[in-house]
Amino acid sequence: MDLNDYWQENKRFVMTVAGGALLFLIGELLIGKYIGGELTKQRASVARLTSDIAKPRFGRSDLGLARDENEALSTATETLAERVGFVPRPGFTLDPARGSVGNQYFARVSVVRDRLLSEAGRHNMRLQKDLGLPALAPTRPEEIERYLEALDLLERVVDIGLEVGVPRIDKIEIRLDPGLNARKGFGKLERTRVAMRLTGPSAALVRLLAETQSPARGASLSIDDLAMAPEKLKAGEAWMEITFTVIRLHGVGAEREEEAA
C-alpha cells in the first residue's frame, strides 16, 4: 500500500491525530507564556526549602542547653510539688501493722470527732457533728486514704478556729476528686476538697485565714475558693465560705527515676 492509498483510507484518523498534536503544542505555548515563569519560581522555591530542611538545625551546644533547661524545669517542678503537695500527719495514713483499713478509719475518725466536739463544747463553738464525713463509711482503701487526709486538714482548721475564737464552723463538705472513680484517672493533679462555712467576728475569721498560711505551722493549707462578707444583722461579724484542697501530684519525678534506672 502506497502513501496515497493509506491517506485515502485513514485520512480522518490522521487529521484527528494531527489536530490533537496541534492543540497540545498550542497548550504548551500558552502555559509557557502565562504561567511558565511562576511554575519555574515555585520549583526553585521547593528546591530551596528541600535543601534547607536537609541542613542540621541544632548542634551539640543546643542539645546541652536543652538538657540544662530540662533539668532546671524538673527541679522547679519537684520543689513546687514539695510545697503544694499535702503531707498527712502520723495517724492519718494507713499502716498494715495497725490492722484492717476499715478499723484504722473508724478508730481515727472516732478519736478526732470525740476530741473536736468536746473542745468545741468547752469553747462554745458550734461544729457540724459529722465533720462532713460520709454517713456510709468508705470501704475502698484509696477512698479511706483520701478521707483520712481530709480529716487531717479539717482537724488543723478546727484547732485554729478554737484558738482564735471562731464561734461557728458548719456546713462542712468533703468531696473526693471525680478522677478517683473515672476511667481516665487524675492526670497530673488530684484534689480532695474540704468546703466549710464559718461565722463569727471578722477579726477572728481573718486571723484563722492567716494562720492556715503561716510558715510557723508548717506547710500552708492550699485554698481553692474563698468568699467573705459582713453579716447584715450583726455589726463586727462576718461569714466566710472557704474550700481547702488536699493536693496529690501524680507522676512528678517519674522522669528522673526512669533516667536513673
Image (cartoon, grey):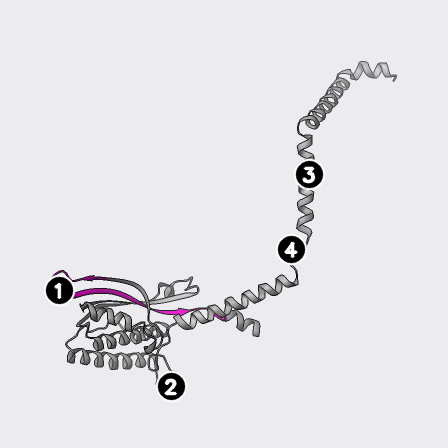
Q: CA distance from mark 3 to mark 2?
A: 75 Å
Horizontally, is 220 left or right of 26 in the view? left
- Characterize the local packing of mark 4: few (<14), some (14-19) or many (20 or more) Cα atoms within 10 angstroms: few
Question: Reading the chain from its start, which is encountered first: label 3 or label 2?
Answer: 3
Q: CA distance from mark 4 to mark 1?
A: 69 Å
Give percent across and percent down for residue 260: 57, 74
Residue mark closest to the camera, 1 vs 3: 1
Pointers 4 and 1 in contact (C-beta within 8 Å): no
The kind of residue on which mark 4 rests is: Arg
Span highlighted in magenta in the image: 228-253
The kind of residue on which mark 1 rests is: Ala
Question: Disc number at residue 97?
Answer: 2
Residue 132 in sight from this viewpoint: no
Quarter that holds the N terminus? top right
Pointers 3 and 4 in contact (C-beta within 8 Å): no
Q: Helix, strand or loop at disc 1?
A: loop
Q: Main secondary structure of the magenta part?
A: strand
